[in-house]
Amino acid sequence: MTVVVGYSPAKGDPSPLHLAATLARSARDDLLVVVVVPAAWPTPVARGADRDYEAWTREEGARSASAAGEVLAGLCPDVSSSVLATPGKSEAATLIEQAERVDASLIVVGSRAEAPDDPGGTIVVSSTGDRLLHSSPVPVAIAPRGFRAAPDARVTRATCAFRGDEASTSVLERTAAICREVGAALRVVTFGVRGRTMYPPEVVGETEVLSAYVEQASARQRDAVDALVGFEPGEVETAVATGPTWPSALAGVTWERSDVLVVGSSAASMVSRLFLGSTATRIIRASPVPAVVVP
Amino acid sequence: MTDVSNRPTTFGEQLRRRKPIAAQKGGHGGPELERSFGTFQLMLFGVGATVGTGIFFVLQEAVPDAGPAVVVAFLVAGVAAGLSAICYAEVASAIPVSGSTYSYAYHSMGEGVAMVVAACVLLEYGVSSAAVSVGWSGYFNELLENLFGWHLPDALSYSPIPYEDNVTGLVNLPAVVLVLMCLLLLLRGASESARVNTIMVLIKLGVLLLFTVIAFTAFEGDHFSSFWDSGAAGISAAAGTIFFSFIGLDAVSTAGEEVRDPQRALPRAIMGALVVVVAIYVLVAVSGVGAQPVAEFESEEQQSAGLSVILENITGSGVPGTILAAGAVISIFSVTLVTLYGQTRILFAMGRDGMLPKRFASVNPLTLTPTFNTIVVAVVVALIGGFVPADYLWDTVSIGTLIAFIVVATAVLVLRRTQPDLERPFRVPGYPVTPVLTIVACVYVLSGLAAVTWLIFAVWLAVVMSFYLLWGRRHAALERGVVADTEVPDQPTPGGH
């Protein structure tokens, strides 16, 4: 299988390459770096400025491709990788097209370009990422801002965001299968956020609702984990993390540098594609580690 | 420690067993709420929660009982409500659990009393949402009539059950629709924020001010001439009916967790809110009674949307009445939403305690709301609102609330004796006079309620208690040892004997 990664040297952000290299190494996959260059204007007879523009995009593509190649050579000489510069009107559409062509297992993108005073470390879904999250046929991984990985880094643990419904059980099963394959640890976490108190608070009930949710989620987690095959009892770590906001809920569990967070897309979606739900969006935004969104 | 594991709990023990406070404290989890309210905000809060539950409907119910002395009835009911709110504040601060009177009773006086209180608060919240939705329906039709010259036919806006000689129909459709709209919001997990609440308060106060100002232009002192004619019986009867319009004052007490310096802020806020609310109510009552003869309040056209109709009669123009009706339609919507919400959370707590089937305590993982519970509540409330006239409902709400308040005042007395060392961030001033006075005041107001109300209440209580006897006491979480060792809540209980 192949990991497809979208990269644009002009943005100067190598974090998607770092993430893609780590993931490809862990899964023993190939790596395909796709540099999307602007497509030329589709005139029947290209001349003058059109032809100049086409030539410039070709050069730009070649330059970007070699830049990406250099980064890869330093980052992951152990991973079989190739670079492709291809014209396209939309970065997201081109990435999906390439992913379908090579039958990719995953598309990797970075966060939106960093603001000057941003401390980094969080995921900010870019316009490309957003479109992928709503239309990709394969899982999408998003690197946090400024993500860097050592040249021999592997994913050591996957944290599956679990909600207790059928959709997230199937996400858990697939995550577990991949974890077994690549030898990573599995952790199952349910996140819950306390509802806002209704004003005027004649009855203060939200804390009660949340603690009931924690109990129910733990019970569902136990059932789902018990149903997983190929894991020793107690091997899978489970946790329920709650807080008044999503970031505080995510901060309720510890995170390692080599973690990834696996989130299912919307349960409401009838299509088999990725379609990111509101809860998943909030979890991703608050995630301190790379997130993989699966259909 | 005696070994109780082999011996079934006796019925008496079941009735008396209390939910340990410490166990609940430990299970609380999550960060503490930020203490962000001051006295003034809290007072506004109390005003907002209280005004609007009843004042839009109550004159038409209470004036026929008490005549002009309805003003005195407002004062009596206000004093009883204010005293109860202060007792409520001590219990709420001493028992740091989320919840309502039901939870406080379970922690302080045992399962038997808790079930009685549960029956009461089901009336306080569930039936009052139904009653409020019926009142909303009246103002909604009035608004339609004024704006478009058309309103729903009587068959679709009145309930089929007759009350005295009121109009009857097939179903009160607007009331049903209102409850179902609230259901959708609650299922989505929407919650009324403090800001929305403030806006609603301003709307309510604004239209009531409008009413008072306009009604005073038609003021005639003659309407007060036979002030005491209805006598003490009339006043206590009116006070009983009016009492529901003070529901919500206890909301201030439950906000204790979020208040800076509760010992000072709580009583001041409750008193302040009480003074403001009573002042508003008395103003509305005085201006209303002054504007038209007492007999007018009983007229058929004022049975729904009363205040709005009074304005139209005074001014001869539809505009002020329309504005008032619009204000009522908007703000009563929020009242229904909040009371429905309260009802679902009480049933939720009961489901958690095993007093109701567990489904009432299951949370939908998508929205983090108790979906099943919310649907059941809304369907029942919609049925009541659609088919029972409000006249039957209000007195039932009052009786439930009054008895719940008496229980709270008793809980203050009981807890001070049984658990004197309990930490109480707020203590009732003037103990033991205040709680005793509360009980006396509530009993006085109760004495005015009609025999039929007592009968309805007795039947309802019997239904709830038989459910408890047949089902609840066997399924209670305490019975099944989910919360073990009620006697020594402070020590960790060793697991697995």
Image (cartoon, rainbow, N blue to C red):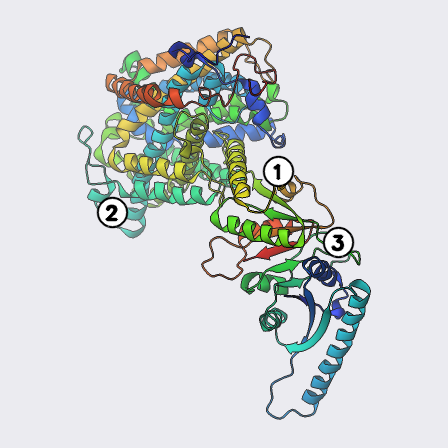
Dot 1 corresponds to which residue?
A: A234
A149 or B228, nearer to the observer: A149
Q: Secondary structure at mark 2?
A: loop
Could you say which disc has been placed on residue B152 in the image?
2
Q: Quadrant of residue B67?
A: top left
Percent across and percent down for residue A266 are 51, 54
What is the spatial separation of the Cα atoms under label 3 and label 2, in whole angstroms?
59 Å
Percent across and percent down for residue B350 are 43, 27
B53 or B213, nearer to the observer: B53
Percent across and percent down for residue A280 are 57, 51
Percent across and percent down for residue A186 are 63, 46
Q: Is residue B196 visible?
A: yes
Q: Secondary structure at mark 3?
A: loop
Left or right: A250, with A59 as reference point: left
What is the spatial separation of the Cα atoms under label 3 and label 1, in whole angstroms?
40 Å
Q: Using the image, determine if residue B428 lies above or below residue A238.
A: above
Q: Are marks 2 and 1 on the same chain?
A: no
* Label 2–label 1 contact, CB within 8 A: no
Quadrant occupied by the C terminus of chain A: bottom right
Left or right: B423, with B311 as reference point: right
Looking at the picture, which amino acid does disc 1 mark?
A: Gly
B423 or B219, nearer to the observer: B423
Callout 2: residue from which chain? B
Dot 3 corresponds to which residue?
A: A118
